[in-house]
Amino acid sequence: MSTTIKAYGAEDAKAHLKPISIERRACGDDDVKIDITYCGVCHSDIHTVRNDWKNSKYPVVPGHEIVGHVIEVGKNVKKFKNGDLVGVGCMVDSCQECASCKEDLEQFCEKGMVGTYNGKDKHLGGHTFGGYSTSIVVNKEFVLSIPKNIDPKGAAPLLCAGITTWSPLRHWKVKKGDKVGVIGLGGLGHMGVKFAHALGAHVVMITTSPDKAQDAKALGAHEVLISKNEDDMKKHKNSFDFILNTIPVGHEMDPYIALLKRDATMVLVGAVEPLKPFHGGGLIGGRKRIAGSLIGGIKETQEMLDFCGEHNIVSDIELIDMFDINKAYERVIDSDVKYRFVIDMASLKG
Ligand code: NAP
Ligand code: ZN
């Protein structure tokens, strides 16, 4: 038997988010039912609401940076018990059998992972609904433990912004002393700066917003490079060991490719859309690479959360009520968020 719960969603690509009712399945043998306390606001939520990627299913109930308490577990669930503080990120299921799943890379499941929202709901039919809601039922394999010592509000964005920046830094083996650039000081970017700093890199914040320079340094950047300043960009030419690019839209690539050292890589995590044409010579001349990265697997997400527990790392957040969400979206679009909005779900339960 499913339960009807309160949520916030959008009925079409032009609509504001508003209160709606959705169904949650009953807690099955392998499931964990979570009372949601906080949910982060990712730029992907906005892309999905506005159908930027042309694959949205309506109504959209976004939210994939979920933190809450366990309120029910199925009989096969041994790892979690009522009252535990847990998290859910961008995925709620995958086949668990393909080569990618077996290598703990469920995000690349060859049969397609199930997104926390806008995914195919194999239990109730239709599509999945995310964390802008009072509760969620999730297969135990996709539930993460939140370290007890970190602030649960600040932990919510770790479930997407955190793992999406952590995974490429680890995959490309960023190490002490490397010169690492992080492009875009938003939700992902500010976590990228914190993690690169914690890994011992020399971190350069690459931003379009000079007014964020002081914050970037407080977050752990050693230098700030204003990307609109051509002279400063020239000074950093051919000098970066690694660049993490979080720009959320298609953009000019040549100025950033020029910053890479020989054999260095720039990883795109933001622009899921066509990029502006770029000159092959920029890559060929220095054996440079452009790559992409998608969130991270469940095992790696837990490792990232444990690292955050050990190093006391959380996201810098602005806590909002559910009904402030439409204003918050406008501010994210205007690159005016310090540095992640998190919804206090008590405001929806009311
Ligand atoms: P965000 O909070 O809006 O931050 C993006 C930042 O990029 C802005 O604050 C701004 O920083 C910079 N920026 C914005 N427009 C720009 C432009 N036209 N040119 C240059 N810089 C620009 O967004 P987010 O939540 O961090 O997400 C970033 C992107 O990653 C989104 O597209 C999101 O969908 C995607 N994403 C991907 C994954 C994945 O797994 N690959 C996971 C989560 C999110 P400055 O003011 O510092 O320039
Ligand atoms: Zn996200």
Image (cartoon, rainbow, N blue to C red):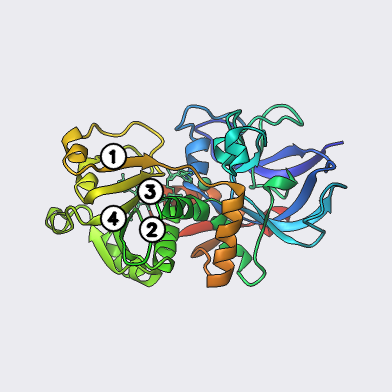
Secondary structure state at the residue bearing disc 2: loop
* Closer mark to the observer between disc 1 and disc 4: 4
Asked if the residue under mark 2 is in contact with the one under mark 4, i.e. CB atoms within 8 Å, the reply is yes
Q: Residue at x 73, y 38 (%)?
A: 22
- Give whichever of 23, 267 is nearer the camera: 267
Q: CA distance from mark 1 to mark 4?
A: 21 Å
Q: Amino acid at mark 2?
A: Val
Residue 122 in view here: yes
Q: Which residue is mark 4?
A: 241
Mark 4 vs 2, N-terminal side: 2
Q: Which residue is mark 2?
A: 174
Q: Which residue is mark 1?
A: 251
* Closer mark to the observer between disc 3 and disc 2: 2
Q: Amino acid at mark 4?
A: Asp
Number of residue marks: 4
Task: Indicate yes or no: mark 1 CB to ligand 1 under 8 Å.
Answer: yes
Q: Amino acid at mark 3?
A: Thr
Please indicate whether residue 270 sits to the left or right of residue 309 in the image: left
Q: Which residue is mark 3?
A: 246
Q: CA distance from mark 4 to mark 2?
A: 8 Å
Residue 141 locus on image (x, y percent): 71, 46
